[in-house]
């Protein structure tokens, strides 16, 4: 992750200031710059090791499974294991995939027994350093309100553009307005004299509390990448004003402001055993 510039989403191009949460769910090796981020749920298997017993059924028996390359059912994996990092990088740039992992039992596993793997000594050492070094972020914690709490009581926390000049939100938030099937970035312009129950076509409001209705300005969300393909804008201009009940107003974390972006958040890939990681990939 990089520092934000004045334009918001773009990066300044300097040195990274942190690592994304995704790293915690990727497999890698301490002496390699490459990580393997799987498309399956295998990266959700919890750790059980010599020092860190983890949660649930992890006990002195240790892990009951191990990670290895799935060369038997995926012939591409065998080919990629002989490639250099540069060769793999070239194929990835072309949209290719060619590495598969499999989880193999180390002993008989009982019905309903949780699956565990050993993330390795580097992961355990990183976790112990994190536990000993972490401290709460600085700031005025007395005024902190979570996004979840704000969304439970939008009536209490919603602010118009005029309100924000003297009474800003307690944390960095973005406001989304749900209209025609999508959340759009929006500004809360002013409160209207009607309530949700006064809107004839809104049958969902008949048996619910009378929520306030605000006049809002929707803004078209500009796609940040080619992956954001499900968003649709159904209006003729890039902004659109409409009355909207607080039922359809939602708070979202500001850019780089959710808990996963806190300074000192734990980031460490799942370790692959040394004898499993190819030698030519160890470039550190």
Image: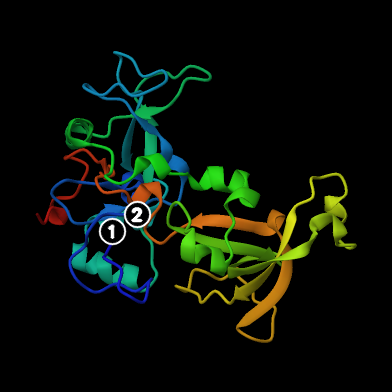
**Above or below — where is 27 with respect to 192?**
above
Tell me the residue at 74%/69% (across/down).
243
- For the point 25% across and 55% down, which residue is it? 18
Where residue 236 sits in the image (x, y, percent)? Answer: 69, 86
Question: Residue lying furthest front in this view?
Answer: 166
Q: Identify residue for label 2.
A: 99
**Residue 265 or residue 142, whichever sits in front:** 142
Q: Is residue 84 visible?
A: no
Can the viewer see residue 228 in this picture? yes
The N terminus lies in which quarter of the figure?
bottom left
Q: Which one is in front, 120 or 20?
A: 20
Residue in view at x 33 percent, y 75 percent: 6
Question: Residue 231's x, y, as percent?
Answer: 60, 70
Classed neighbour count for the residue bearing mark 2: other residues with Cα under 10 Å, few (<14), some (14–19), many (≥20):
many
Residue 251 marker? none
Q: Secondary structure at mark 1?
A: helix
Quarter residue 109 falls in: top left
Position of 81 with respect to 219 (left or right) is left
Give the vertical position of 103 relative to 161 (above or below).
above
| Above/below status of 112 relative to 249 | above
In this figure, which residue is indicated by the disc labeled 1?
80
State the residue at coordinates (40%, 62%). 255
């Amino acid at each position: 992750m990089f520092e934000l510039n004045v334009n918001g989403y773009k990066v300044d191009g300097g040195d990274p200031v942190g690592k994304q949460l995704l790293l915690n769910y990727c497999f890698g090796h301490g002496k390699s710059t490459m990580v393997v981020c799987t498309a399956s749920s295998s990266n959700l298997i919890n750790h059980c090791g010599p020092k860190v017993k983890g949660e649930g059924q992890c006990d002195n028996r240790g892990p009951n499974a191990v990670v290895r390359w799935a060369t038997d059912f995926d012939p591409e994996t065998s080919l990629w294991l002989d490639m250099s990092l540069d060769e793999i990088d070239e194929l990835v740039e072309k949209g290719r995939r060619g590495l598969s992992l499999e989880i193999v039992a180390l002993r008989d596993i009982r019905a309903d027994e949780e699956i565990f793997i050993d993330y390795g000594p580097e992961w355990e050492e990183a976790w112990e350093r994190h536990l000993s070094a972490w401290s709460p972020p600085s700031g005025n914690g007395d005024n902190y309100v979570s996004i979840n709490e704000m969304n439970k009581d939008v009536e209490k926390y919603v602010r118009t553009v005029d309100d924000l000049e003297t009474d800003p939100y307690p944390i960095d938030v973005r406001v989304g307005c749900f209209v025609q099937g999508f959340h759009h970035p929006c500004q809360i312009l002013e409160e209207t004299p009607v309530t949700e129950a006064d809107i004839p076509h809104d049958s969902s409001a008949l048996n619910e509390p009378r929520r306030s209705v605000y006049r809002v300005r929707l803004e078209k969300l500009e796609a940040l990448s080619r992956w954001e393909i499900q968003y649709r804008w159904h209006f003729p201009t890039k902004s659109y004003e409409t009355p909207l009940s607080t039922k359809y107003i939602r708070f979202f974390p500001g850019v780089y402001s959710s808990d996963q972006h806190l300074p000192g958040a734990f980031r460490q890939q799942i370790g692959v055993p040394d004898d499993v990681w190819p030698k030519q990939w160890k470039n550190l």
